Image (spheres, rainbow, N blue to C red):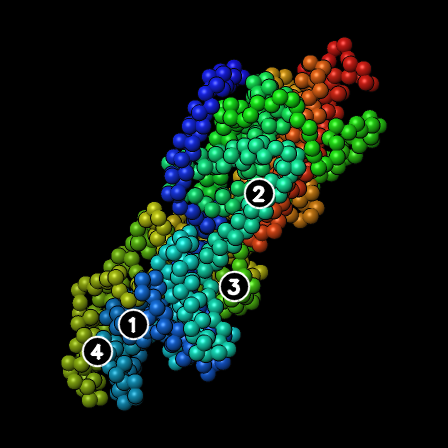
Amino acid sequence: MVRFFLRIYDTINNRRWHPVSISLIVWAICLTLASRINYQEDISAFLPVDQETAEYTDVYTKLGGQDRIAVIFNGDTMQMIPAMDYFGETLIDTDTTGMVRNLQVTIDEEYMLDVMSYIWHTYPLLLSDKNFSHIDSLLFTNDFVRSQMEDNRRLLMLPFGSVVTQSLPWDPLHLSAPITSQLQKNEINDHYQVIDGHIFSKRDKQGIVLLSTPYGISESRQNERLVSLLNNVADTVKERYPGMEISNIGASVIAVGNASQIKSDSLLAVTLSVFLIFVVLFYSFRRWGDIGWIGISIVFGWTVALGCIALFYENISIIVLGISSVIIGIAVNYPLHFLDHLRHEPNRRNALKEMVPPLLIGNITTVSAFLCLVFIDADAMRDLGIFGSLVLIATIAFVLILLPSLVSQRKQSGKVHFILPNTDLKIPRLFHQLLLPLVVLLTIVFGYLSTHTSFDSDMQHINYMTPEQRENLKQLSSSMQASDSLITAFAVSKGDNLDKALIANEDLLKVLYQENRIHHITGIGDLVPSSEMVQKRTEKWNALWKKHAETILLMKEEAESQGFSSEVFKPFFDLCNADSLTINYDNPLQKTIGNNYILQNEKGQVHVVNVLQIEKNKIDEVKQTLRNEIEEQDLNAFVFDSTDVSSSLVTVLSDSFNYIGFVCGFVVFAFLWLFFGRLELSIISFLPLAVSWLWILGIMDIFSVQFNIINIILATFIFGQGDDYSIFITEGLTYEYAYGKPRLKSYKNSIMLSAVLMFIGIGTLLFAKHPALRSLAEVAIIGMVTVVCMTFYLPPLVFRWLRTNHGVIREVDLTV
């Protein structure tokens, strides 16, 4: 490979316009492509999921109504209802582009009448087996028909008789009462109260206006426009009603806040890091040209990577770009090491010849480590693996192919300026001997503590929310919780289509109804029957009225005695004599209750959700019992709660973490062995990484720093950056041993400068307000401080032990 790059250098060195033209053309093409890419801000894209976790999270997030936004009103209760009405009117007038969907300022009573009308027309198909048994017994009761007819006459005399008039022709015996009772359990009144048609929370008396966004949670640009519209309308309302507090909460609102905070934090981190890096580079090099070439190398690699990504992907996570300072911390090593080496070897060709091996093997191992992320089942992880690899490949290509011909020829070695103490400071051998037992002891302790390192899978901990949003979310959650002693679980049936999912749900409900430790079940229940159930209920209904044919005659007599026309109840009599009954799934009931509990994923699979309320101290026992029943009866269903979502994510994160650690370690060691060709040199280079990893995990456990879906990627970064440092230290040691020329000092200075730049690039993320970005900085700083210290201490120590004996060079090296 050295000859390959030297030939390129010899070919283009005397034709400098060639590399300039090539780089400008490539840069312009990639910049054009990069301008077309879209950016997503959904943190959940970093979640690596298996099939079970995917099912849990899909149901859990969709059931939470990620397209819904709640506008919350706090203030004078006398002004709240007119303020809510004015908000709705102003929003409709202002929303000229139709961004707001399903605006609900008041309860739509007309729509609820449509639901009731549908029930009156189809209630025979919505009755459960228990309802049929109860009706059967009622029809055998003496005077049941007479009492119902008397009640009907009295009801018609009441002020709301018009509503009853609509139901009586279809249900004069009030047989649909169990259905309306079940319907009320699913209504908003379970968790809220309705005052003058407006929705209020029961606990906090907050006014609530509901609406939907037509955009997905990752479409932050469009959602940002919608949130801006809501805020502007809220300001208008507050001008008319001073003292009224209005705020928004919802998944899309939180996503917009996340996107905005990530952008501002990233801009701050990149701006601050660029400035500080520039100061350090200027102090160290004192050459504007060298600083410029470092910047050009990074910009070239960055642009080419984005351009290549745009060729194959339409979208990329903005969080991937938000951690750009971390990737820059690695990429900056390549031009930095080459330019720094020119101060000791001014001949560009000789410098290239000496720098190709360590730079190239460092790049290969780091790129290989990043590419390990491609095999993790998470979109953003794959984005990061590919993007990081492309940045490093494009940067090293620029440094090894174009930079040697573009940089000016050096006549003499430049003077080294550095802000840290002399890295070639001789440390007494006694200090090394005293320090080694301490390092070994701490490694054993940290190795033990590393087994306790934990993962935080709670998305709220890595989502950015304002204090107001957290309070609103807390209040809404408390309003939805039936009791402090109860916890919510979900029993879900599934099928390839709606009918199969409904059939599975009917089997699941039999299991749920048998479990007496479930306090409450909310869902579609018997309100949305499958085709099989429709047929069974039709047969039951027909059999019921064949059995009670005399009841129909009695009804006609009692109706006439109460003054009813003989034709009033004809629709009911037709129902009783119908040979077949049908149901239309495109109905008001399906659009209300059904849409709340019947979910469809991207693959077309349908989930029917039942929400269970179970005592906290019995939740695990009940879940296990239900799972055993589901398994024994081979039902197409599953049961979970929020803790299962977290625990399954922890399991997947742990597996992904172990995968990254083992695979990255194996790949790095394999390439080190291939590069050095000697096992002992490979071990010397890999030893700082292995020891550092135990220290990192142990220190994280001591300071209660947890891994999450974002900072877990730093396992790749630490291996990638650490192996570069180890390679240079080992290369310097072997060079001095083989040729007797000083080289280690140059490499150490270069590593220290690189480390300072890296700490600046990552350290600026500590100023971020977004928890995900800040967690990156915390873990990275712990990791890289450890890696740098171990790289400077362990390789020279082990190398000296292999090559010398009490300071005297061994006649035969201790090698493998």
Q: For the residue marked with disc 4, what is the amino acid?
A: Pro
Q: For the residue marked with disc 1, what is the amino acid?
A: Tyr
Residue density around tag 3, few if under 14, some if 14–19, many if 20 or more, within 10 Å? some
Q: CA distance from mark 4 to mark 1?
A: 20 Å
Residue in view at x 66 percent, y 34 percent: 284
- From the image, tell me which residue sits under label 3: 469
Furthest toward the front, the residue is 411
Percent coordinates x, y for residue 661 in the rendering = 58, 34
- From the image, tell me which residue sits under label 1: 111
Left or right: residue 547 compared with residue 674: left
Q: CA distance from mark 1 to mark 3?
A: 32 Å
Marked residue nearer the N-terminal end (2 or 1): 1
Q: Nearer the viewer, mark 2 or mark 4?
A: 2
Marked residue nearer the N-terminal end (2 or 4): 4
Marked residue nearer the N-terminal end (4 or 1): 1
* Kind of element beneath mark 2: helix
- From the image, tell me which residue sits under label 2: 274
> Is the residue 682 above or below the residue 315 in the image?
above
Marked residue nearer the N-terminal end (3 or 4): 4
The answer to whether marks 3 and 4 mark residues whose Cβ atoms lie closer than 8 Å is no
Percent coordinates x, y for residue 89 in the rendering = 35, 74
Residue in view at x 24 percent, y 62 percent: 583
Residue nearest the viewer, comparing 499 with 241? 241
- From the image, tell me which residue sits under label 4: 169
Q: CA distance from mark 2 to mark 1?
A: 59 Å
Q: Nearer the viewer, mark 4 or mark 1?
A: 1
Residue in view at x 60 percent, y 36 percent: 718
Q: Nearer the viewer, mark 2 or mark 3?
A: 2
